[in-house]
Image (spheres, grey):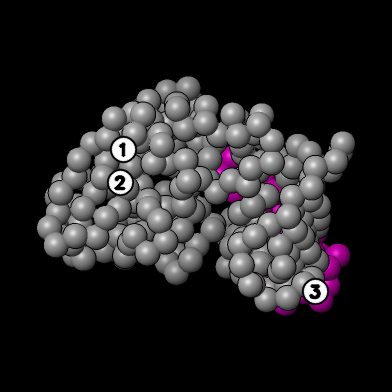
Amino acid sequence: MKTLYTKIADHNVTISISNPFSLHLEKLLKAEIQSNENPDIDLVINKGFGKPFVGFDINITKAKNKMTFERADYLIEATTDYKSATIHVHDELALKHALMNLYSSYIVYHNWGLLIHSSCALEAGKAHIFSGHSGAGKSTAARLSQPRELLSDEASIVKVTGDSITIFDSPFRSELNSNGTSQVSPLASIQLLNQSLQNKREQLKKTDALINLVDKVFYWAHSPEETKKVMGLLKILVSNVPVYELYFKKDNTFWELIS
């Protein structure tokens, strides 16, 4: 077994990998740390499960001391606190999605924060999220935001602590890699994307913001208690960060409304 010591946001992660193993974890997890005897998350990753991606449907099973998430191309077997897990994957896409599933479950369970389907860029040291349904323009907004530093292009890691909302550089990328050195930044705004022929930004009421963000969270509901945690974290988020409907043209002029 080969062991990798890495870090996702605040969390030290130990990954044990069966040899030989052809998946390129460095594409996902670039940060390396020294050996940690007490990791926050302890993983074993095995290749050779299932078949290529066919859909997002996941079967979730909860036992007394075990959580299981099974999709056609991956299987997660985790302790109920998500501190220890074995992940079986078919390929690199399955690996990325399985890690997102596990990490999202971990940070929700520990009431630490949320993984939000979005891109995120920095302006003057502050983070701005661009979220929306598939095809709304998250990757487009990320590309148009360059050369601003990008903290994510698919899944933003949002730490929710009282009145402090911060964003971490995300290893869960779709197309665009990290292009800067910032690891964590305060969150200044959230944009819900709508492609348009002209730029316009309208702030939402907190209740409307909450409703619109619920389905943007990477979360697989399996218990009322965990769903309650997600809602509680979202309430803190929208109470401290303004949320806007952003109607934008496919050029970088929409930043004039933000900065």
The residue range painted magenta reads 1-26
Q: Position of residue 129 (x, y in %)?
A: 36, 47
Inspect the magenta stretch and tell me whether residue 63 lies in it: no
Q: Position of residue 161 (x, y in %)?
A: 50, 27
Crowdedness of circle 2 by 10 Å Cα count: few (<14), some, many (20+)? many
Please name the residue that numbered disc 2 is placed on. 191
Q: CA distance from mark 3 to mark 1?
A: 42 Å
Above/below status of 195 relative to 211: below
Above/below status of 48 relative to 58: below
Relative placement, left or right, of 200 versus 4 is left
The amino acid sitting under disc 1 is: Val
Q: Nearer the viewer, residue 35 or 28?
A: 28
Looking at marks 3 and 1 on the same chain, the residue that comes earlier in the sequence is marked by 3
The amino acid sitting under disc 2 is: Gln
Could one spot residue 115 in this view of the protein? yes
Q: Residue at x 80, y 74 (%)?
A: 48
Relative placement, left or right, of 177 versus 220 is left
Provide the secondary structure element on which disc 2 rests: strand
Label placed on residue 48 = 3
Marks 3/1 in contact by CB < 8 Å: the verdict is: no
Q: Residue at x 20, y 40 (%)?
A: 202
Q: Nearer the viewer, residue 21 or 252?
A: 252
Marks 1/2 in contact by CB < 8 Å: the verdict is: yes
Label placed on residue 256 = none
Looking at marks 2 and 3 on the same chain, the residue that comes earlier in the sequence is marked by 3
Please name the residue that numbered disc 1 is placed on. 243
Crowdedness of circle 1 by 10 Å Cα count: few (<14), some, many (20+)? many
Relative placement, left or right, of 232 versus 129 is right
